[in-house]
Image (cartoon, grey):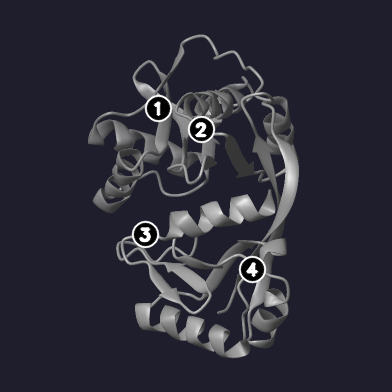
């Protein structure tokens, strides 16, 4: 499973507007944002990596004006962490990822008065981005680049889902375009006035249900804390492997 998840990450980064391949790494560069959560690298699973490769990787980030940062399934590149630490990188986090299949998917009821719908216009996409930013404690705004990024994700086979309550967007989430039958679900967020009603679980389960209906075999995600972990487990997700987040200042 680790190998399949890592391959999907590699394929996803190759779709970045300015993706670069350097040695055994794929670097996903987006010229419209300097966010390290969007601009990062990942190793090709099983590829041999040397200290020289790491030096070249740092130079690639520097040339692009981005912070050197990697995300990857730990088992896919044994020994890489030691090379990165020796090159001045520091571990940000170690997370377990969870997977779900059509067979394990659970069911959540949607709270009364809430409609789960895929945004079909840029104003609807902007409303979803604003709601998610607010849910994650960020500025409640959506730039044209943010909207274009979400639109591209949908056009490439990914999925966005908004929870609409009356005239408000209460939250939502998305799934990345599938790669070899695998899709990552992420960005599940619910605004404070709409929490503690089971909406986060309903959004997660509905995104999974829709991408399974499009032929996806495995959905995966990471939990941001104990509360979300329990929600995802109830939706049918189970721990399957570990991922490393590591960067250099």
Q: Is residue 133 left or right of residue 49?
A: left
Query: Could you tell me which secondary element the residue under label 4 belongs to?
Result: loop
Q: Which of marks 1 and 3 is nearer the N terminus?
A: 3
Residue 148: x %, y % from top left: 27, 47
- Most extreme residue toward the top is 112
Q: Residues within 10 Å of mark 1 (few under 14, many from 20)?
A: many
Estimate the spatial distance between the alpha carbons at disc 3 and disc 2, rounded to whole Å.
29 Å
Q: Disc 2 designates what residue?
A: 191
Which residue is found at the position 36% from the left and 59% from the top?
16
Q: Give how far across and how far down residue 50 sits, in percent.
A: 62, 86
- Separation (CA) of disc 4 from disc 1: 43 Å
* Mark 3 or 2, nearer chain start: 3
Give the residue at mark 4: 46
Spatial CA distance of label 4 from label 2 is: 41 Å
Q: Is residue 231 above or below residue 1?
A: above
**CB under 8 Å between callouts 1 and 2?**
yes
Badge 3 crowding class, 10 Å Cα cut-off, few under 14, some 14 to 19, many 20 or more, is some
Give how far apart the Cα atoms at labels 1 and 3 are. Answer: 28 Å
Residues under labels 4 and 3: Cα distance?
A: 22 Å
CB atoms of marks 4 and 1 within 8 Å: no
Sequence-first tag of 4 and 2: 4
Query: Across the whole image, how many numbered discs are drawn on residues?
Result: 4
Helix, strand or loop at mark 1: strand
Considering the numbered disc 3 on the image, is that residue within a helix, a strand or a loop? loop
Label at residue 169: 1
* Residue found 47% across the figure and 32% down from its top: 172
């Amino acid at each position: 499973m680790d190998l399949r998840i890592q391959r999907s990450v590699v394929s996803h980064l190759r779709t970045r507007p300015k993706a670069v391949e350097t040695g055994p790494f794929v670097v996903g560069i987006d010229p419209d944002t300097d966010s390290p959560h969007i601009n990062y690298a990942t190793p090709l699973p099983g590829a041999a990596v040397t200290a020289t490769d790491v030096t070249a990787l740092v130079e690639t980030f520097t040339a692009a004006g981005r912070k050197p940062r990697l995300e990857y399934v730990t088992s896919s590149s044994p020994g890489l962490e030691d090379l990165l630490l020796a090159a001045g990188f520091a571990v940000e986090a170690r997370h377990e990822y969870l997977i779900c299949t059509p067979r394990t998917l659970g069911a959540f009821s949607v709270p009364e008065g809430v409609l789960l719908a895929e945004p079909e216009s840029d104003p609807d996409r902007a409303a979803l981005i604003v709601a998610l930013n607010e849910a994650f404690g960020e500025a409640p705004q959506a730039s044209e680049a943010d909207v274009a990024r979400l639109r591209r994700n949908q056009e490439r086979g990914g999925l966005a889902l908004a929870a609409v309550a009356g005239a408000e967007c209460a939250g939502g989430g998305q799934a990345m375009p599938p790669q070899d039958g695998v899709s990552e679900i992420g960005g599940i967020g619910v605004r404070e006035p709409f929490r503690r009603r089971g909406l986060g679980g309903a959004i997660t389960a509905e995104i999974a249900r829709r991408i399974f209906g499009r032929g996806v075999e495995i959905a995966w995600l990471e939990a941001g804390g104990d509360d979300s972990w329990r929600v995802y487990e109830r939706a049918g997700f189970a721990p399957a492997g570990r991922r490393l987040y590591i960067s250099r200042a």
